[in-house]
Amino acid sequence: MAPTAARRFAALRNRDCRPYLIGVGLAMMADNIEHVITYWVLWQRFHSPTLAGFQVISHWVPFLLLSVWFGALADRFDCRRVIQASQVLFMTVSAAWGVLFLTGTLQTWHACVLLVLHGCAGAMWGPAEQLMLHDFVGPEELPSAVRLNATFRSLGVLCGPVIGSGLMLLLGTTGGIFANVAFYLPLTTFLAVTRFTGHSRSHRSARPAVSVYSSLRVLRRVGTDRTLISMIILAGLASFFLGTALQAAMPDLAEGLGAGSSGFAYGVLLFAAGAGGVVGGLLLESTHWLRPTVPTAVVMTVAFALSTCAFALTTSYLVAVPMLFVGGVASLASTSIGQTVVQLRAGDADRGQVVGVYNMAANGLRFGSGLVVGVLGQLVGLHGALATSSAALAVGALTAGLYGRRPASRPGEVPATAASKVG
């Protein structure tokens, strides 16, 4: 029997998944609003480059250290409650910032603690979020759910700075950070009423243990699956070489293009990559051009690397903007395909931990991109550093693709016919 074609925007047609996606977009926007407000206040109060660097490290290192453990929590417990716990932690951190702003008692150690807690909330959210997507739509429409989830997250990232700046203008930093708490409420409230738990399709006979041993066992099992390893390597390479490098280098690169570090032309550069993620997600969902396979993920990762390299090397503003846009499309495609493949190949019993391993690479290694820009940028300049990192990513992606071409079979893996029915 020929496989049925997946519906376009299938996840949005799903009445259970649709409000979840909207809630995710709002929560992601709140995450970025908090960055806009708190980073501005911290710089105005302390003028500390060290604290500015810690802002990046504290956001991503929890993903590196805790993603597998949070994946185990998602495997064992009701994912609704895990996500709600992460959202409550987000809201508590925002409210704590507000109290410190209001009372004028903010100190460096307060900031460090809150930044770490914010990073932990994001790491806790990740694996449970992916399990909920699988539970809402099942394997047939999982690619749609993952693509649209990534699109709504990109929309949140895109809108966060705009809304955050508007809140500061209208309500001030204290009023703005308190108002930000409200954006976390729709997702938290929806999870209180939905019947899906992240496990209702899994038919598990027992809850897996949450322990160091279980995490090591999952890591060993992942290591025997070439397809999983290739997806994790792809995500890790993109995270390490280009994760936050583009944002960090943007002011210098913009000046080289004649856009300066402020004004409309600079804003367009900042907007282009995020817009590429949103438009790319909608385009891919409406056309279904790309299948969730290792070769497709490799091609999209290489496209992301090459477009970023072209942006770093060009001196033309008219070339730079479309290259950033193309990079945004390719980055979203590569990430959503990687997440889909990982979920399809993971078993019901440890899907959260396998997703946690992927998140560990895809997000935890982002702190390394700051090192790449800082160290390599001192040697060859930011343009050369970004171009070199992009080239390294392209070579690494091709190598990972070759490694994953002959996946080692394992009991219980998703057959190829299942993958052909989705995406």
Image: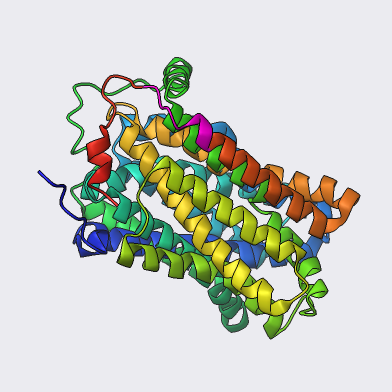
When the figure is inspected, residue 392 is found, relative to residue 29, above or below; the finding is: above
Q: Is residue 251 left or right of residue 88?
A: right
Which quadrant holds the N terminus?
A: top left
Query: Is 68 contained in the magenta span?
Result: no
Query: Which residue: 57% across, 46% down?
Result: 119
Query: Which residue: 25% across, 57% down?
Result: 17
Query: Is 404 contained in the magenta span?
Result: yes
Query: Which residue: 67% across, 74% down?
Result: 319
User: Looking at the image, what colour scheme do you see?
Assistant: rainbow
Q: Is residue 365 visible from the viewing direction of this image?
A: no
Q: Is residue 42 left or right of residue 186?
A: right
Q: Is residue 287 visible from the viewing direction of this image?
A: yes
- Asked whether 342 or 395 is in front, the reply is 395
Please provide percent x and percent y for residue 224: 44, 20
Please provide percent x and percent y for residue 360: 53, 36
Please provide percent x and percent y for residue 111: 69, 52
Q: Which range is magenta?
A: 401-408
Characterize the magenta stretch by its predominant secondary structure.
Answer: loop
